[in-house]
Amino acid sequence: MLNKKNVFSEEIELPEIVLKKTNQAFEMIKQEDIRCMEKINTKSKKLFKTQAAAVAVVCIVAVSSISAAAAIHHWGRGMNGNIQASEEQQQVLIEENIAKVYSEDPDSSSLAVTDNGITIRPDTVVVDERLVYMSFCISGYSVEDRTEPGFEAVSVYQGDNPEDSDAWVDMNGTMYNGIIPDENGIPIYEDGTSIESDEDGSIICHYTDSNGNMEYIIQASVVDEKDSFLGKTMHIGFKNLGTLSKAEFTPAVEGNWDFEITLPDVSSSQTIEVGQKVEGTDFTIENISISPVSIKVYYSVGTAPAENEDDLGIPEVKGVVLKDGTRIPYLMDGGGSGYTDSSKHNAYQIAGYDRVIDVEEVAALIVSTSYENKKVEIPISK
């Protein structure tokens, strides 16, 4: 479990051998052509049946300490584009068994699945109770410039029975293409430069890294707000590679690449009692469960507001204010909300982030009241 005392800023003294290997790791990173990503939602509606493809079985194992690791770990380029994190934040989550970088595993080659000359392997996984982020490295496949690569189908389910209704998860997936949001939610390239476009206005994307590999990013959340991903087995399946244009798939390579990943059972969340009414609404934030990568908010309300199509009228936490005054107004990235029962006196919101945060530094929540998109700040104390 995460140390609740400045886990992202605590100074750690490293032995000489560790420092030497760390410096070597940094030199390697400087040589990489690091890019970012833009998300395209591909919510999983139906699980496809796998055929004779091999299944890579992956278990996350804890790393005992920085000294034992003997080097600074680094998430894959796709994962760090999906949920940005400093090197120190990455290291802390890895050491606490909340994140795993498979490319650094001595047995990583055994985790790869190859079909029709295309090899896919798990790269990085980050998980808490309600959200799991997964990235997969794809080698042996390339597309022409200005062309978007993609799969015909991607399936994600938990447990051992894909037909079980409890196996379903909410899933978004995309090929990492080199674009991320800045702190104000404006798309930029990872190096901080502005987005470039073709003559027809299409955004120029960078799907491959310096080695010619691509990454596919998955963000999955629990369907039942009472469920938890901790300790669960996740099944991930990719079917047929090709290109996407205007939501249409054009096949290029047939294949099935299937993986079984056992998630850790380590919680990184803190539950904080809030008891604050959201100004301009009848909702009160009763408590939150907050981790470095996601948040769950519980509300109470006397009378539920009228629904407007898909808008339930439930307030939404959009960002946070840190103790030093720093505002991150567009922190939340995906998720959902709803009522916990038919009485509609209690509601919830689950949301992931676009970057890792230090929970200990959070002083207030930035909340959208839903009506007229007005935002208010709700102070919290820990």
Image (cartoon, rainbow, N blue to C red):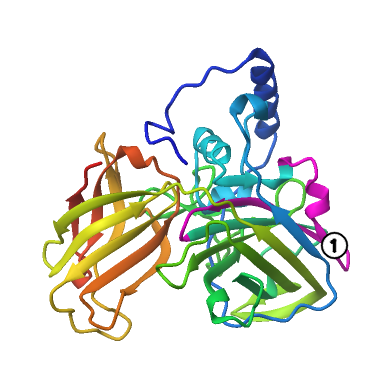
Residue denoted by label 1 = 114
In the image, is residue 157 above or below residue 298? below
Q: Determine the residue positioned at 79% across, 72% down.
A: 256
Q: Position of residue 104 (x, y in %)?
A: 72, 40
Q: Is residue 196 above or below residue 7?
A: below
* Residue extent of the magenta highlight: 104-130
Can you give x and y, in whole percent of width and height, for residue 237 in the image?
Answer: 70, 70
Q: Total marks drawn?
A: 1
Is 122 part of what is drawn in magenta?
A: yes
Q: Please give left or right for residue 161 compared with residue 197 in the image.
A: right
Amino acid type for the residue under numbered disc 1: Thr
Give the camera-side residue of 334 and 231: 231
Q: Is residue 43 visible?
A: no
Picture residue at 70% right of the left edge, 47% below the top: 102
Q: Please give left or right for residue 254 compared with residue 178 in the image.
A: right
Q: Residue furthest right?
A: 117
Quarter of image, res 34: top right
Q: Residue at x 85, y 62 (%)?
A: 114
Q: Nearer the viewer, residue 119 or 271?
A: 271
Above or below: residue 352 compared with residue 153? above
Kindly indicate the quadrant of the structure image that contains residue 175.
bottom right
